[in-house]
């Protein structure tokens, strides 16, 4: 009986963790570089631009990436069939370090951050001047998100044929926010010049004309548009997922679903003031725990205004944006 056991023991299934792990790791030196342009049910659409030309490739995420997330805008390295031919599937094996990350939370008390897009240089905040009316509180929150992400904000005001833009432009001028004003069927040269050769992400609530802009900037985009509800004054969500589109003259624009709120649970007041070099320099003299708000009795920003070091309009505008951190998200 003992000899029979010895005879077949070598065929027993080995115990767990008995196989030595190799220190060798796959070498992806020959992997192709691409950028994620949209995601749909575990399939990643990539834009590859190499010696073989620009093409669209479908890929899946490698098991080696584990739980590491891949988002629109990520620069990745892929192996496998990168021809872009129908019914082919490549494999994402590496995600390059992100240069910028635009994120938001569902609400201000929500600890879960949601990444909207990676590696975008410019945040284009699209706001209608009428139909629906502008929502400055949402614009302020988008500005906070842009400063937190290290992105350059651009305020794009649409439908100037329905209402003037002067007041809204003036309210953001002290912060140095660049502004472009557009109208229905009017030229987009000014906007195009700012987006050229950049990766920009467009955000705005439904009905402001974001998808209409995208269709004009990228004629073959075919983004669905809709009218504003006459009763609620709100638009209907027409973009259901983020998608990056190549601009004819270079660069990418990322169209995102319309937003109703923009949670900022991940942003602290001290992080916001760091986006304004002159204000941050003056705030060094603030007492510990100062929030830099208008109700702070010993805030150094007020002293700097009194001495003429800072423009009062800039401080007031900063505090308005700062207040959006504690204002309702809707």
Image (cartoon, rainbow, N blue to C red):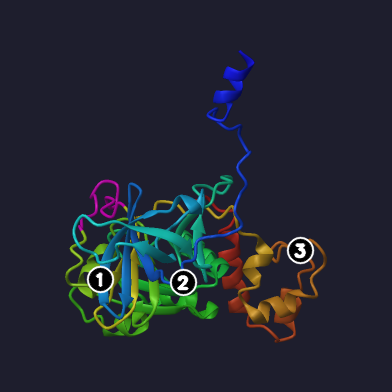
Left or right, 141 with reference to 2: left
Q: Nearer the viewer, mark 3 or mark 2?
A: 2
Q: Is residue 54 left or right of 3 when viewed as pictured?
A: left
* Disc 2 to disc 1: CB gap under 8 Å: no
Viewport quadrant of the N terminus: top right
- Foreground: 35 or 230? 35
Q: Nearer the viewer, mark 1 or mark 3?
A: 1
Task: Give the residue displayed 39% in from the left and 61% down from the top.
Answer: 72
* Residue 266: x %, y % from top left: 60, 55
Magenta residues, start to end? 224-240
Which of the 4 quarters of the picture holds residue 17? top right
| Badge 2 or badge 1: first in the primary sequence | 2
Residue that carries the numbered disc 2 in the rendered image = 29
SS label for mark 3: loop
Q: CA distance from mark 1 to mark 3?
A: 52 Å
User: Which residue is situated farthest in the top direction here?
Assistant: 1
N-term mark: 1 or 3: 1
């Amino acid at each position: 009986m003992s000899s029979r056991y010895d005879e077949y023991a070598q065929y027993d299934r080995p115990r767990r963790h008995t196989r030595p792990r190799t220190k060798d790791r796959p070498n992806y030196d020959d992997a192709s570089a691409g950028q994620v342009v949209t995601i749909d049910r575990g399939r990643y659409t990539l834009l590859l631009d190499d010696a073989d030309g620009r093409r669209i490739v479908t890929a899946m995420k490698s098991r080696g990436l584990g739980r590491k997330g891949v988002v629109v805008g990520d620069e990745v390295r892929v192996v496998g069939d990168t021809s872009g031919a129908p019914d082919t599937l490549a494999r994402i094996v590496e995600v390059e370090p992100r240069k910028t990350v635009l994120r938001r939370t569902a609400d201000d008390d929500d600890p879960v951050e949601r990444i909207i897009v990676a590696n975008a240089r410019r945040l284009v905040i699209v706001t209608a001047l009428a139909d629906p009316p502008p929502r400055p509180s949402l614009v302020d929150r988008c500005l906070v998100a842009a400063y937190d992400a290290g992105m350059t904000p651009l305020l794009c005001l649409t439908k100037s044929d329905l209402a003037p833009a002067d007041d809204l432009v003036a309210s953001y001028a002290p912060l140095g926010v660049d502004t472009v004003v557009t109208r229905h069927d009017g030229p987009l040269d000014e906007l195009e010049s700012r987006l050229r050769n950049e990766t920009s992400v467009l955000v705005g609530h439904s009905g402001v004309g974001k998808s209409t802009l995208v269709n004009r900037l990228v004629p073959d985009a075919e983004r669905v548009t809709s009218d504003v509800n006459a009763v609620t004054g709100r638009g209907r969500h027409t973009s259901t997922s983020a998608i990056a589109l190549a601009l004819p003259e270079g660069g990418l624009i990322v169209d995102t679903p319309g937003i109703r709120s923009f949670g900022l649970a991940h942003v602290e007041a001290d992080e916001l003031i760091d986006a304004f070099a002159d204000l941050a320099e003056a705030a060094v003299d603030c007492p510990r725990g100062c929030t830099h708000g208008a109700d702070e009795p010993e805030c150094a920003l007020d002293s700097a205004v009194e001495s003429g070091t800072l423009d009062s309009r800039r401080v007031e505008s900063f505090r308005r944006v700062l207040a959006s951190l504690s204002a309702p998200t809707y």
